[in-house]
């Protein structure tokens, strides 16, 4: 049996240890593998795309259409991520190459990360860590500006694989879980005790809001100057999805006037972030460098799922998590 060929495409910032993990997993599945970065010379990219049976993009970023055109033997473009807005899937569609995501296999890591951001804000962990290390205990708030999660109303936008896992974690803290999704999920409501609200009602009701949506034409600036007027003063917002789900001008405005009482973010308007980013200058903003889904456990699971998907497609079986 002739071995199938996978092209592994990655960004130069990906550490060597992770590159090796991916390559070794591909070899274990009995594939032939070659690799390139997004900065590989264009003619070499074309040759590699013409050579392969499948492309594994980890992560998925824009590839020139003239390169994609060469992938005449390619049966699948598999993306490492659950989101696909940074990949020019329209070009793949033009040449009839299926594009698949990982189906949010990072749901555990992302959900735990969102909880970590929420707890860090509710307990002001960054501030208290700093003053403790400096020995500056005098005149601290003694907890008067902290709060428990129990009995708080949390509103979740997007009850997909990640949003649902996050909602169940919130329920374990005895929070009142409300959600809004394009599709109402009554069976899940009954099973877990979640409550559905309209977008407007959720914004008015909840002290904490968490975003778990894909970024597309319908969700860009999902929270904006108009609808953020509805939230309670001091509302906490968690965003581990995409920065552009929230209108940047509105976000800064409402952080300044205190309507937003705290912000926990893992996704940023500019990545990597810059030193003098105005948004990151607020003391009540806690941020991480887009690492919510990055754990060893997640990597193992994502790679296995993606390679299984590739194998199924090459064997003309059903493939999962297909975008086009």
Image (tube, rainbow, N blue to C red):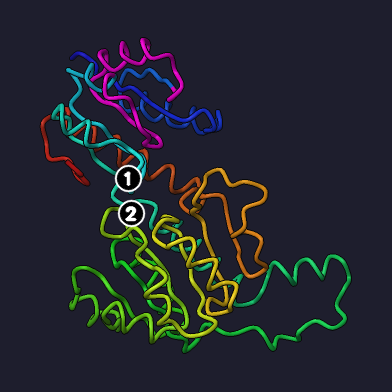
Q: Which mark is residue 215?
A: 2
Answer above or below: position of 186 versus 181: below
- Residue 259 lies, in percent from the top left, at 53, 80
> Which residue is disc 1 drawn over?
85
Res. 77 image quadrant: top left
Give the class, few, some or many, for how many residues have Cα within 10 Å of label 1's Cα (few <14, many ≥20).
some
Answer above or below: position of 22 versus 235: above
- Residue 97 lies, in percent from the top left, at 17, 30
Upstream in sequence: badge 2 or badge 1? 1
- Residue 232 lies, in percent from the top left, at 47, 85
State the SS at label 2: loop
Q: Residue at x 51, y 61 (%)?
A: 113
Q: Residue at x 50, y 79 (%)?
A: 235
Answer above or below: position of 240 versus 62: below
Res. 282 image quadrant: bottom right
State the SS at label 1: loop
Magenta region includes residue 43: yes
Q: Is residue 110 left or right of residue 7?
A: right
Give the class, few, some or many, for how many residues have Cα within 10 Å of label 2's Cα (few <14, many ≥20).
some
Q: Which mark is residue 163?
A: none
262, 82: nearer the viewer:
262
Are discs 2 and 1 less than 8 Å apart at CB? Answer: yes
- Residue 240 lies, in percent from the top left, at 45, 59
Magenta region includes residue 144: no
Res. 179 image quadrant: bottom left
Distance between the Cα atoms at labels 2 and 1? 7 Å
Residue range (magenta): 37-66
99, 221: nearer the viewer:
221
Quarter the N terminus occupies: top left
Q: Is residue 35 left or right of residue 158?
A: right
């Amino acid at each position: 049996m002739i071995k199938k060929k996978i092209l592994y495409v990655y960004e130069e910032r990906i550490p060597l240890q992770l590159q090796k993990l991916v390559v070794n997993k591909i070899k274990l599945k009995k594939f032939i593998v070659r690799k390139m970065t997004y900065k590989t010379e264009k003619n070499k990219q074309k040759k590699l795309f013409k050579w392969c049976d499948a492309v594994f993009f980890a992560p998925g970023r824009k590839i020139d259409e003239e390169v994609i055109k060469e992938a005449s033997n390619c049966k699948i473009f598999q993306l490492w991520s659950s989101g696909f807005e940074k990949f020019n899937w329209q070009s793949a569609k033009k040449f009839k190459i299926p594009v698949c995501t990982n189906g949010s296999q990072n749901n555990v890591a992302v959900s735990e990360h969102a909880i970590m951001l929420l707890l860090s804000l509710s307990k002001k962990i960054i501030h208290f860590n700093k003053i403790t290390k400096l020995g500056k205990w005098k005149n601290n708030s003694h907890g008067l500006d902290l709060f428990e999660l129990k009995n708080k109303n949390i509103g979740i936008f997007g009850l997909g694989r990640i949003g649902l896992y996050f909602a169940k974690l919130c329920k374990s803290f005895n929070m009142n879980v409300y959600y809004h999704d394009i599709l109402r999920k009554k069976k899940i409501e009954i099973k877990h005790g979640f409550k559905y609200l309209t977008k407007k009602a959720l914004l008015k009701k909840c002290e904490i809001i968490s975003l778990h949506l894909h970024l597309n034409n319908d969700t860009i600036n999902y929270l904006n100057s108009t609808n953020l007027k509805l939230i309670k003063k001091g509302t906490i917002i968690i965003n581990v999805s995409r920065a552009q789900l929230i209108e940047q001008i509105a976000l800064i405005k409402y952080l300044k006037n205190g309507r937003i009482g705290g912000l926990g973010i893992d996704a940023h308007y500019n990545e990597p972030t810059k030193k003098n980013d105005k948004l990151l200058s607020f003391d009540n903003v806690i941020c991480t460098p887009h690492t919510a889904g990055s754990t060893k456990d997640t990597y193992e699971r994502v790679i296995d799922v993606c390679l299984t998907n590739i194998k199924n497609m090459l064997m003309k079986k059903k493939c999962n998590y297909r975008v086009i």
